[in-house]
Amino acid sequence: MSTKIFNALSVSLALMFSINTWATPVTAFVPDGVCNTDNVQLTSIMESGQFNELLGGASPAYSASSCLVFDGNDDGSANAPVVNIGQKDDGLLNTKYGPDDSLFFIEPSELQNLDNFPVGIADDPGWIHLASVGGEVGSDNKLAVDYNQAGPIVDGGSFLDIDALLDMTFTCVESDDGECTALNWVIETDPTIIDQVSQLLGEATFDHLAISIKAGNGFVIYDFDFIDIFAAELLAYPASSLDFNTPYKLSGTLDTDDFPNQRGNAQAISHLNVWARDPSDPTTITRINEPSTFGIFVLAVLGFISTRLGRLKAQ
């Protein structure tokens, strides 16, 4: 890494360390402080541009793997990472929470060394913020999607617009007084750029997708752990063709039943935030004994964000 890039990166990280503090989970707005993973579901996986359903083993649908409840607002700097390649303290999911300094949905053994800062220390969670979703429901019942970008690491450096890789839609299906309380979501990778990405950077993976829902006086983050989901598919459906070299279309549902008002009715969605976690080395994932061709996560093309920017840092 050049001295110029290293110094600029060190300054940006120091700024992040000094200004980012996040609240611990406070669960007063959810009864008993417990969220229901059934309120956000993955209902379909198809190859991009195709119509053959690939889920068919353990379940026709998967509830979120886990969820966390917070009082307050997840918007603002919490979902506006400075560099957005998954570095420690760069955005909400790349921090710790709670009295025991727990990580968001991952274990300490899954931390990475994305920026070599501090030198030789694996302290980066790897979460990339994909998009913020919200605003008024449009005439087509869709919420507006504001895609993020990855980079630049230094002023004037390279960056990547995430909307060049993904197409997301969030369509309201239930409402109260014209405000959305449930919706269908779709995240699809652009199939036309897979070959280009593979030629440049080789295989790339994601292992988590997290959707944060803000409604009422708090927010709940729901996480899909694709290591476990894909393992369940392979166990129950050995013919599963899911792999990390294929562009996929994910579909699902979500609702705000975890956000009841005083009358017990679901409150309207204020906004959503969407994150995905990029493990830097899929060979280090040891929670399951998967085949070598096993796909950890379906948004394969997005993995080149951290790989590409990591190469820039090494120049």
Image: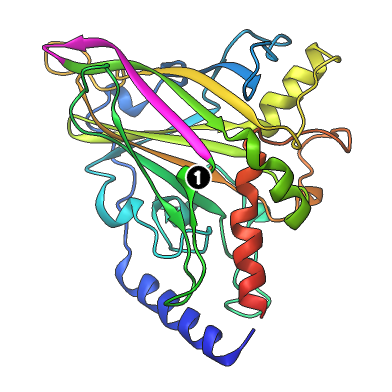
Q: x and y percent of residue 309 in the render? A: 59, 66
The residue drawn where x is 66% and y is 60% is: 307
Q: Say whether residue 206 is visible.
A: no
Q: Extreme front residue here?
A: 192
Q: Is residue 269 left or right of residue 86?
A: left
Q: Eyeballing the image, is 312 above or below 148?
A: below
The residue drawn where x is 64% and y is 37% is: 192
Q: Does the stretch in magenta take in 199?
A: no
* Disc 1 element: helix
Q: Extreme bottom residue here?
A: 3
Q: In this view, does 310 lie to the left or right of 272?
A: right
Q: x and y percent of residue 208 in the render? A: 58, 38
Dividing the image into 4 quarters, which one contains the C terminus? bottom right
The residue drawn where x is 53% and y is 90% is: 4
Q: Is residue 207 left or right of residue 201?
A: left
Q: Nearer the viewer, residue 83 or 260?
A: 83
The span picked out in magenta is: 166-178
Dividing the image into 4 quarters, which one contains the N terminus? bottom right
Q: Residues within 10 Å of mark 1 (few under 14, many from 20)?
A: few
Q: Main secondary structure of the magenta part?
A: strand
Q: Does the stretch in magenta take in 172?
A: yes
Q: Which of 172 and 99 is in front in this view?
A: 172
List the residue tagged with mark 1: 164
Residue 73 picture quarter = top left
Q: Is residue 80 left or right of residue 13?
A: left
Q: Eyeballing the image, is 131 above or below 64?
A: below
Q: x and y percent of residue 283 in the render? A: 81, 49
Q: Nearer the viewer, residue 242 or 220?
A: 242
Q: Say whether residue 85 is visible.
A: yes
Residue 313 picture quarter = bottom right
Q: Which amino acid does label 1 sit on?
A: Ala
The residue drawn where x is 29% and y is 35% is: 219
